[in-house]
Amino acid sequence: MPWRVIAHGDQVWHVDALAERPANAEAWQLVLSFRSASERSGRSFWTLYPLEASSKSSLFIQAERIPDTALSQLLNGWRAGAVTPRWSCRGRTGANSRASPTA
């Protein structure tokens, strides 16, 4: 079950929030996963969101305060090429799909 569901244009997107702590870092960073709900498009991408905290629970509490409009702006930026995804997958998802790292 997705963390959030965002209607954007003519598509519905599932958004998941994850915590990542890079090696030798003290703070956890928020990573957002966007996945099109439409099975036929199969588009998805992951991106860092400018939030960090000393614990995962604090990070997720802060993430709950992110408005849907901010998530829609990230989608707009990704579609316009202004948001650089960490991972992106376009087309079919599943065993035969290919994800490409972009960071």
Image (tube, rainbow, N blue to C red):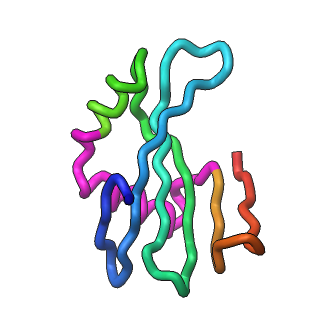
Residue located 63% across and 49% down the image:
86
Residue located 49% across and 42% down the image:
31
Towards the viewer: 62 or 69: 62
Residue 9 horizontal/vertical position (percent): 33, 79
| Magenta residue span | 64-86
Please say if 53 is above or below 100. Answer: above
Residue 85 covered by magenta stretch: yes
Q: How many marks?
A: 0
State left or right for residue 22 relative to residue 64.
Answer: right
Residue 53 horizontal/vertical position (percent): 40, 21
Residue 93 horizontal/vertical position (percent): 64, 73
Please say if 17 is above or below 8. Answer: above
Residue located 71% across and 52% down the image:
102
State left or right for residue 71 relative to residue 19.
Answer: left
The N terminus - image quarter: bottom left
Residue 100: quarter of image: bottom right
Please say if 66 is above or below 59. Answer: below
Residue 33 covered by magenta stretch: no
Towards the viewer: 77 or 51: 51
Residue farthest toward the bottom in the current orientation of the protein: 40
Residue 27 horizontal/vertical position (percent): 49, 18
Towards the viewer: 74 or 43: 43
Residue 23: quarter of image: top right
Residue located 59% across and 53% down the image:
85
The C terminus - image quarter: top right
State left or right for residue 80 relative to residue 56.
Answer: right
